Amino acid sequence: MQAHYAFIGGGNMGRALIGGLVAAGQPASTITVADSEAGARAACGERFGVTTTADNLAAVRNADVVVLAVKPQQLGAVARALAAAVPSDALVVSIAAGITLEHLAAWLGEQRAVVRAMPNTPALIGRGASALIANTHTDDAQRARAAALLDAVGASVWLDDETQMDAVTALSGSGPAYYFLFIELMEAAAVELGLPAALARDLALATARGATELAQQSDQTPAELRRQVTSPGGTTERALASFADDDLAGIVRRALTAARDRSVELAAQVSS
Ligand SMILES: NC(=O)c1ccc[n+]([C@@H]2O[C@H](COP(=O)([O-])OP(=O)(O)OC[C@H]3O[C@@H](n4cnc5c(N)ncnc54)[C@H](OP(=O)(O)O)[C@@H]3O)[C@@H](O)[C@H]2O)c1
């Protein structure tokens, strides 16, 4: 039998996941979306043909999988209100940044199967990178369902220790912004070197895409690919030496550490 999905929150990320599920063959008739905002309900209903409601409790009543896709600051109240209504054998998947399995257990009940997921914004175009962690009440079939949900919008990996989620947040959660910044900076530098802005952006974007796809498809590591394009005495070598002089490795390490530390701080601020 097809599993029934209830989404609480049909905003950006909720819609990306619903779109992924439907594209992967999940019938729209098995998906219910609850959202307090009429525009989000209309968008989900029109785009995917799913059932929509403003009533969170009604949405979860017959659900096998409940996906919590509201903002982290809204989640405590939403989850507490849902606790008694979610069927006892249903899986709950939370995608809220900084909300731990411990918070979710406190709000939803200690015995419930819960998976915490950290997707990122390229999920909006089916190219996301997500990390997942399950609590001990989650069985293999539920883990497979959670992975299939996130795999439908990109790639996913399982963590075995929840403390890794803070490093994941620093790497893939915040990571798209680092790449956007690098593209911006390369474009700006190329404009200073005399290229028209539109042309510089097109080349910077195509280069980012080509380099990441080459690195993904290649058997070689990114370091090996880099060495191959670094001819002795050439232009790339000169640029890489400039990066090293400016301690790019340290810059990146400090930035990810700052993001990781902020993730720890934000989780500590959520009250159970
Ligand atoms: N976007 C990302 O890149 C990203 C990445 C990783 C994780 N996440 C996580 O994904 C979650 C959703 O993010 P988002 O960007 O999709 O947010 P969003 O666009 O604001 O979507 C959340 C939706 O839930 C609705 N809502 C608020 N309170 C509700 C309630 N009590 N009952 C039912 N619906 C309610 C909101 O309506 P209103 O607008 O009226 O509040 C909104 O339509 C967040 O927890 C975030 O941490 C997002």
Image: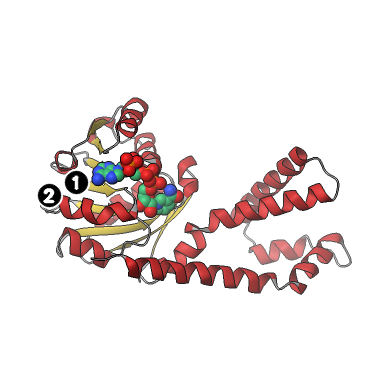
Residue 254 to residue 88: above or below: below
Query: Which of the two labelled residues, at mark 2 and mark 1, occupies the earlier sequence position?
Result: 1
Viewer-closest of 214 and 253: 253
To which residue does mark 2 refer? Answer: 87
Image spot of residue 253 (x, y percent):
59, 72
Query: For mark 1, does the 10 Å Cα neighbourhood hold few (<14), some (14 to 19), or many (20 or more) residues?
Result: many
Viewer-closest of 206 and 15: 15
Say whether residue 117 is left or right of residue 206: left
Kindly indicate the quadrant of the structure image that contains residue 44: top left
Image spot of residue 78 (x, y percent):
22, 50
- Identity of the residue drawn at 77% across and 73% down: 245
Q: Which mark is residue 64?
A: 1
For the residues bearing labels 2 and 1, Cβ distance under 8 angstroms: yes
Kindly indicate the quadrant of the structure image that contains residue 156: bottom left
Outermost residue on the right side: it is 233
Quarter the C terminus occupies: bottom left
Q: CA distance from mark 2 to mark 1?
A: 8 Å
Quarter the N terminus occupies: top left
Q: Secondary structure at mark 1?
A: loop
